[in-house]
Amino acid sequence: MPAKLIPYTFLRRGESEMRGRAAALLAEIQTRRSCRFFSDEAVPRDLIEALIAIAHSAPSGANRKPWRFVAVNDPNLKHEIRLAAEAEERESYSHRMPPEWLEALEPLGTNAEKPFLDVCPWLVVVFRIDWEEIEGQRVSNYYPAESTGIAAGMFLMACHQVGLATLTHTPSPMKFLREILGRPINEKPYLLIPVGYPARDCVVPDIPKKPLSEALQWNR
């Protein structure tokens, strides 16, 4: 049965204001970097909840919201996650990654050691929900990967907008996250996102970004 229709509350802005807002947002978001050196300074739980609420407003296939955000700040759980992530990363760096992948990672200076997983005040683990049990029936969700990706992107943007640093961490395979956090079989780990303030001595690689001209094509 179709849902009841209600008016769309939309604020129409003038073109000059839209361009100004777009320019300001672009300038701000271009300062976002992946952070691997975090401060242990506390971040309020209600702020993390508000940021996840923003992510939860993301569009999704058939409005199923096929994601789960698990926010972790318990030191013991964070350390358990670190140990499991580093074990997988050691295997990846030593045996799983092909030479060209290791070469691509070299400018970033990354390795199997992930101390930020202990230091960072919050680890937000995003799970993708491919199916759910509804009234005793297994029901597939629509476009779960695409939908979860949009929600994760909105979370990253929201964190940066309020002044928090993030990292998209993907130790592979990530099955250990489901086991450590006690999530059901239908939830698949999608991203591990440390969230917090950068350390005072935080540094990031000085590497060029791919120019927009290589990512944008106009068809007229």
Image (spheres, helix red, strand yellow):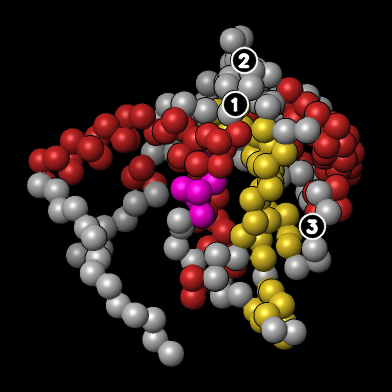
Residue 136 in the magenta stretch? The answer is no
Question: Which one is nearer the viewer's eye here, 220 or 134?
Answer: 134
Q: Amino acid at mark 2?
A: Ala
Q: State yes or no: discs 3 and 2 in contact (Cβ < 8 Å).
A: no
User: In the drawing, does residue 166 fall left or right of residue 92?
Assistant: left
Which region shows up in magenta?
Answer: 51-56
Q: Residue at x 34, y 80 (%)?
A: 4
Q: Residue at x 51, y 41 (%)?
A: 51
Q: Secondary structure at mark 2?
A: loop
Could you say which disc has been placed on residue 109 in the image? Answer: none
Could you say which disc has been placed on residue 43 in the image? Answer: 1
Residue 210 visible in image: yes
What's the distance in space between the residues labelled 3 and 2, CA to CA?
Answer: 31 Å
Q: Which residue is mark 2?
A: 199
**Residue 218's x, y, as percent?**
26, 58
Question: In terms of sequence position, does the residue under pointer 3 or pointer 2 come before the other?
Answer: 3
Q: Residue at x 75, y 68 (%)?
A: 186
Residue 111 visible in image: no
**Residue 153's x, y, as percent?**
50, 48
| Structural crowding at the residue carrying mark 1, measured as other residues with C-alpha within 10 Å and reported as few (<14), some (14–19) or many (≥20) | some
**Residue 140's x, y, as percent?**
65, 79
Question: In terms of sequence position, does the residue under pointer 2 or pointer 1 come before the other?
Answer: 1
Question: In terms of sequence position, does the residue under pointer 1 or pointer 3 come before the other?
Answer: 1
**Residue 175's x, y, as percent?**
82, 54
Q: Which residue is mark 3?
A: 183
Count of residue discs: 3
Relative to residue 54, is residue 197 depicted above or below? above
